[in-house]
Each structure stands twice: as C-alpha cells, then as structure tokens.
Amino acid sequence: MGDGAKARRVYEDAVEYLCRNIDALRELIGPELWESRFAVVRDVDPSTGEWRDAVRELHEAAETAGIPGGLGLRATMGVGDWPSGPTPRSVGWVCPTGRCARVDLRAGEAAQAPACALVGQPMRLVDG
C-alpha cells in the first residue's frame, strides 16, 4: 500500500468514526461548523482537497470539543507503524458512497442492511 493509499485509509477511518458517532459529534461540534463541513464530507468527491479539508476541520473541532485524538487523523505511532485494518471478512456491508471505511459484518441469513449515517441509504452488501 503506497503512502497515498495509507493517507486515504486514515481519512476513511476518520469518516467511519464520524458516521458511528454522528449524533454526539454534531452536538459537541456545534451547528455552525457542523452544517457546512458535514455537507462537504457527505456530498463532495473524496479524492478532492476540499473533502480532505472538511474532514480535517471536523477532526480539529472534535479535538477542540474535548475528544482526545479527534476523529483519529493523527497517527500516534512512529513512521511506518500504521494501525492495521480490520480482519477481512467475506460477507458484510460497506459504505454505499465509498466515503468511509465502515464495515458491518453480516450476522445471520435474515440480517437487514444497516443504513449509512452520511446519506441515509442502505449500505452495500459485499458477499465473498
């Protein structure tokens, strides 16, 4: 995985944290910054600088609000000591927009697709 892919993964992990804690973060960050920056994270292409800047601003706002490590953009380990990703699984749901690294594993045959916190759509099933 190249340096660009590592950086992309760090941002995806930050947006995953944002998705999982959306209500608490909205309240802590406050409506003014939240509304403008969250809209960019939700709607803008993740490969753009504007998208990364919005994630970074939400990260900094989360730190300022008292969340140690914010959304997790800053690595706390030494160079080359990147956090490992989750263990790959063959069946589960992923973000329908590709904006975050969230993966919800499928639990049972009749499990229903969880909803994406960013866009409110069902997450995309990845089966094998």
Image (tube, rainbow, N blue to C red):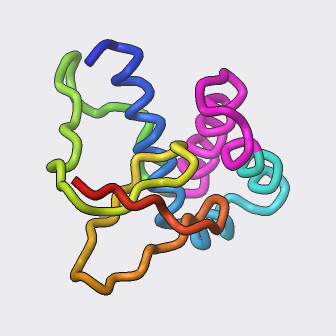
Residue 106 placement (x, y as % from top left)? 27, 71
Front-lying residue, 112 or 83: 112
Name which quarter of the figure residue 40 lies in. Answer: top right
| Observer able to see residue 70 | no
Task: Give the farthest residue toward the bottom.
Answer: 110
Residue 50 placement (x, y as % from top left)? 72, 27
41 in the magenta segment: yes
5 in the magenta segment: no
Residue 111 placement (x, y as % from top left)? 33, 82
- Residue at 41% over, 81% down: 112
- Residue at 30% over, 63% down: 92
| Vertical position of residue 118 compared to residue 87: above or below | below
Front-lying residue, 79 or 105: 105
- Marks counted in the figure total 0
Name which quarter of the figure residue 103 lies in. Answer: bottom left
Highlighted magenta segment, given as a residue range: 40-66
